[in-house]
Amino acid sequence: MFKLSALCFATLVALHAPAAFAQDAARPASEQALASRIDAAIAPYYKADAPGATVIVTQDGKTVLRKAYGMADVAKGKAMTPDTALRLGSITKQFTAVAILMLLDEGKLALDDDITKFLPEYPTRAKRITIEHLLTHTSGIVSYTSRAGFERNSTNDMSVAGMIDTFKNDPLDFAPGTRFSYNNSGYFLLGAVIEKISGQSYATFIEQRIFKPLDMRHTAYEGHERTPGPRAAGHTKGWFGVTSSKPLSMSQPYAAGALVSTVDDLARWDAAITAGKLLKPATWQKAHTSAVLADGKPTNYGYGWQIGKLRGVPMVAHDGGINGFSTSALRLPQQKVYVAVLSNSDAPTVQPDMVASKAAAIAIGNPFPDFKAVKIDNALLDAYAGTYRIDANATRSFKRDDGKLVMQRTNRDPVILTPYADDRFFMPASLTTFVFARNDKGEVSHVVVDSQGSEMINQRVGAP
């Protein structure tokens, strides 16, 4: 929760897209061809009568694609439009992070300030928990959305202090700074810090300091919207198909995931980042740089952004998942490409990060390959079976089941992989591939996992 998806150009013009991001029907044929390639790649993921998505792709400040797919409200038969507002989920975190960094640039806090400087009643268990620990998910504080009973009580309207009371007395999961563990509690506490320093509510601060200056008229803390406009209903997967999503009090996601926005406003947000607005240049650079743990290992997370690569080029990104909605937004700074995908289902057929990654890869001229399934011998499947180490806390196991290779990661559901070569497999409805490698003795020694352009090697550590 709050986590670490068809209209022609003439129709888009008729929808009165904002001038800064409107598509120009008279633009060069090469640009129109690029838009058509991206659309052809992602349109098949969305059905006209099912929950859909809004998508924007910009390059060098120009809109390449701005389009809506599927339904904004399945029950009412209301089609999605490009200007529809949707919940962002954890994309909210980058706005919270920037709000904190604005206060940093103003000298009102330091990243190494102990959180008790601003939240004196918070019990830190004799440990030093800093603002930076909260920003980077390295505080060790228990994430309140993973606590038993959270979902059962998630419709209750809560005060900021009351919500903090629900998790503040839990023991730390680990010593601050020693591990990365995605944590909604940290960003909830950052919202409280913003309120304490500014004397304003979180909703008011980000509206006045971020949304209004950047002309993000359709972005707000849900329930505090300023400008009317179309809004998507949230959907989930029920026993008998698509149904309305479960209710949620937006006082609970708060600074960790309570914002709503449109793809147009997110493109404005990216344009402001590219222009270096709101923060000092060095502060922006720090926000988009991986944090480092006490042992020197990078976390691949900065301040409100995941740090990685896509097709070999640097990428900063973040996904979101909240009742009824799944989202993804990524930036390729060197290529000046931005993609946002906002979908109104929390159980989409295809995850928004896959759609965003595929669109971005096409935009930079390095598309992901289309894999074709092949058949391979059971003997090869047996050779790949075994346990492979991901990190100190997780493994990945492979086994043959009824002529198929099944992969299961620690604490995850099993997934059937599809072979596209004797030693290569892909995960359906994703861009993740698995390539098995052998040592000098001809034994399978490790598997190379490529997740949307970022590779990691999992060493084989045991039999099935």
Image (cartoon, helix red, strand yellow):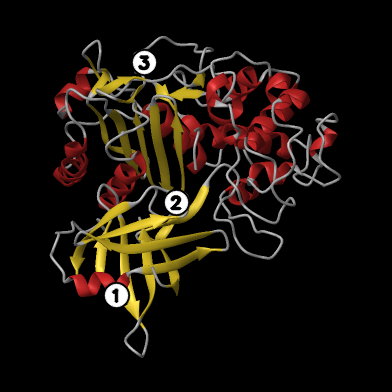
SS category of the residue bearing label 3:
loop
Residue 429 visible here: yes
Left or right: where does residue 261 sit relative to residue 431? Answer: right
- Neighbor class of circle 3 (other Cα within 10 Å; few <14, some 14-19, many 20+) is some
Residue 288 in percent (x, y) is at: 56, 50
Front position in the image: 386 or 77? 386
Distance from the alpha carbon under mark 2 to that under mark 3: 30 Å
Residue under label 2, please give it.
333
Q: Is residue 117 above or below residue 175?
A: above
Residue 50 in percent (x, y) is at: 22, 25
- Neighbor class of circle 1 (other Cα within 10 Å; few <14, some 14-19, many 20+) is some
Q: Could you tell me the amino acid type at mark 3?
A: Arg
Looking at marks 3 and 1 on the same chain, the residue that comes earlier in the sequence is marked by 3
Between label 1 and label 2, give the one nearer the viewer: 1
Looking at marks 2 and 3 on the same chain, the residue that comes earlier in the sequence is marked by 3
Residue under label 3, please give it.
231
Residue 278 visible here: no
SS category of the residue bearing label 1:
helix
Distance from the alpha carbon under mark 3 to that under mark 1: 51 Å
- Quadrant the C terminus occupies: bottom left
Residue 10 in percent (x, y) is at: 15, 24
Residue under label 1, please give it.
383
Q: Is residue 346 above or below residue 338?
A: above
Q: Residue at x 71, y 53 (%)?
A: 177
Q: Residue at x 17, y 45 (%)?
A: 37
Between label 2 and label 3, give the one nearer the viewer: 3
Asked if the residue at tag 2 contacts the one at tag 1, i.e. Cβ–Cβ closer than 8 Å, the answer is no
Asked if the residue at tag 3 contacts the one at tag 2, i.e. Cβ–Cβ closer than 8 Å, the answer is no
